[in-house]
Image (cartoon, rainbow, N blue to C red):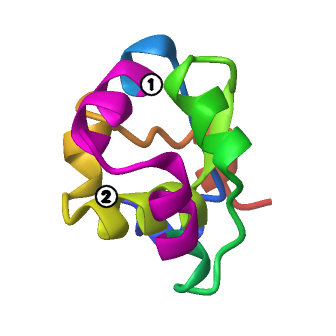
Amino acid sequence: MVPLEWVVMLAWDTECGETLKSLRGKKSRREISDAVSSQGVECSQEYIRKLENGEAASVSTKIIAAIAKSLDVELIEIMSDLRVEVSKTFCTHS
C-alpha cells in the first residue's frame, strides 16, 4: 500500500462526480467550499461543480480528502474504485 500523503493527484470521472453530488445531499456547494477552506485547503464552489459534473480529469488528494471530511464520509465512499498503482520503474533503483 502507498500512503495517501505520497499521492498528489487522483483520477476523477463522472461516476465519482455523481457520488459526490449524492453525498453532498442538501448541503450547498458554498457550505462545502467554506468547510474545506476552514481546513486550510482552497476549493471554490465552481471547482466542486466541475467535480460533480465530471468536468475535472483529476483532483488533488488534499482537496478530495478535505471534501470527504467536510461531508463526514470516508474517501473510499466518494471514490469506491480507489486504487493506487506504482509502476515498476518507480520502484527500481539505479
Residue position for label 1: 17
Magenta stretch? 17-35
What residue is at 44 percent from the left and 25 percent from the top?
17
> Mark 2 packing: few (<14 Cα in 10 Å), some, or many (20+)?
few
Q: Position of residue 74 (x, y in %)?
A: 20, 58
Helix, strand or loop status at disc 2: loop
Quadrant in the picture for residue 47: top right
Residue annotated with mark 2: 1
The amino acid pointed to by label 2 is Met
Q: Amino acid at mark 1?
A: Gly
**In the picture provided, is 50 more to the left or to the right than 32?**
right
Say what secondary structure mark 1 lies in.
helix
Picture coordinates of residue 75 (x, y %)?
A: 29, 53
Find residue 6 and report its horizontal and vertical position in percent: 57, 68
Quadrant in which the C terminus appears: bottom right
Drawn side of residue 73 relative to residue 20, left or right: left
